[in-house]
Image (spheres, rainbow, N blue to C red):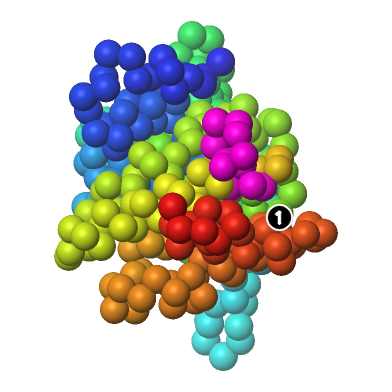
């Protein structure tokens, strides 16, 4: 319901930069996930989208986390944390990074200020465990304290809600304060995601270290694939020599064409069953100047390892890797100069 297909998005706005296109997508959907091959600049692009929304680290309206297998609900939403209180150490409920971010957004008196929360490698975490009941709260249709049409509350009871006293003379960590120092905590009666909070996730959808996201989570995000060729110019443009840029593009295009191409002939698609998600992004080729433009060193130190993982378990992996090296060297798959 909330997804806008890429084709529709691009109609009429082809002259805008990619981050501006994605800014529009984010504003309409509240939640987007940037997918695509490794090295295509998804993380950098997420930051550029946030900047286009007016959210920066300096103004406090931007936050960044990276998910991993050990990341959990207590890190993201709330949990018990050890606190020194005199001699003994006691455990107190503390907001996680996302809940603290939402608290800041809820306290902003200017509704036009947009807050952007970026989750890098979002599929490397155990999504259901991390988000818990926030599956409801991040849904674009349930943003804000209450539903605009029905007036029904959008607040949810978090797992540690019973440790939050509804007495407004208590701070967010349940510390008693003098009345003149009262701090209003917006989530005393339940949590909600403010309407000025936007989520951007990034992921390599071919990552074999994680299980698939469940459909309940996917439904709440618009997905946009970052194609390797689309970010090639912006990433390689930082190289200092034009001839190196040109050669990097040739090698990158030739290699990716061999991994997957819509063309279906003997010079393309060496890897049966692969898709554009397995392409090699320009960020790998940007490293060439570290090796004094030695393309063999770039292959050995960066590109070969990625392709080796792609080919793991395939019976003729060694032969395929040799063929891909020939293509990378701008030869045909048999090693003959073109």
**Residue 191: percent from left, percent from top:** 54, 40
Residue 144: image quadrant is top left
Residue at image point 26% right, 19% down: 13
**Residue 264 sits inside the magenta stretch:** yes
Query: Residue at coordinates 22% horizontally, 54% vertically from top-left?
Result: 237
Using the image, determine if residue 262 lies above or below residue 33: above
Task: Return the residue nearer the eye: 58 or 308.
Answer: 308
Query: Quick check: can you spot residue 158?
Result: no
Residue 130 on the magenta span? no
Rendering coords of residue 11 (x, y %) = 33, 14
Could you say whether the residue bearing mark 1 is in a helix, strand or loop? loop
| Residue at the farthest top position | 149
**Up-down: is 37 above or below 135?**
below
Disc 1 residue crowd, few under 14, some 14–19, many 20+, Cα 10 Å: few
Give coordinates of residue 18: x percent, y percent. 30, 35
* Front residue of 55 and 201: 201
Q: Which residue is mark 1?
A: 208
Residue 282 in the image: x percent, y percent?
38, 55
Q: Residue at x 69, y 31 (%)?
A: 216
Eyeballing the image, is 209 above or below 54? below
In the rendered view, would you say 86 is above or below 269? Answer: below
- Give whichever of 310, 183 is nearer the camera: 310
What residue occupies the far bottom of the structure in this picture?
A: 87
Residue drawn at (55%, 31%) of the image: 263
Provide the residue span drawn in magenta.
259-271
């Amino acid at each position: 319901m909330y997804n806008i297909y890429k084709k529709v998005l691009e109609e009429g706005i082809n002259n805008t930069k990619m981050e501006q296109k994605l800014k529009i997508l984010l504003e309409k959907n509240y939640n987007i996930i940037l997918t695509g091959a490794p090295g295509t600049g998804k993380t950098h692009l997420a930051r550029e989208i946030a900047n286009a929304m007016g959210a920066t680290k300096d103004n406090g309206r931007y936050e960044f986390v990276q998910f991993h297998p050990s990341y959990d609900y207590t890190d993201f939403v709330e949990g018990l944390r050890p606190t020194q209180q005199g001699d003994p150490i006691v455990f107190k409920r503390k907001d996680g990074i996302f809940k603290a971010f939402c608290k800041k957004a809820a306290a902003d008196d200017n509704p036009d200020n947009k807050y952007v929360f970026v989750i890098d490698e979002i599929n490397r975490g155990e999504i259901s465990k991390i988000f818990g009941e926030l599956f409801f709260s991040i849904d674009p249709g349930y943003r804000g304290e209450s539903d605009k049409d029905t007036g029904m509350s959008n607040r949810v009871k978090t797992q540690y809600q019973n440790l939050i006293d509804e007495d407004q003379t208590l701070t967010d960590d349940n510390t008693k304060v003098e009345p003149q120092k009262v701090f209003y905590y917006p989530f005393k009666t339940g949590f909600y995601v403010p309407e000025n909070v936007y989520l951007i996730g990034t992921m390599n959808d071919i990552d074999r270290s994680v299980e698939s996201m469940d459909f309940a989570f996917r439904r709440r995000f618009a997905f946009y694939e970052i194609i390797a060729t689309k970010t090639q110019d912006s990433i390689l443009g930082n190289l200092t020599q034009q001839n190196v840029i040109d050669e990097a593009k040739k090698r990158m295009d030739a290699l990716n064409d061999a991994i997957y191409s819509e063309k279906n002939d003997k010079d393309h698609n060496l890897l049966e069953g692969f898709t554009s998600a397995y392409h090699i992004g320009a960020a790998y080729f940007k490293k060439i100047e570290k090796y004094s433009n030695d393309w063999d060193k770039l292959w050995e130190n960066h590109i070969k390892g990625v392709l080796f993982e792609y080919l793991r378990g395939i019976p003729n992996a060694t032969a395929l890797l040799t063929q891909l090296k020939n293509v990378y060297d701008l030869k045909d798959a048999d090693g003959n100069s073109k």
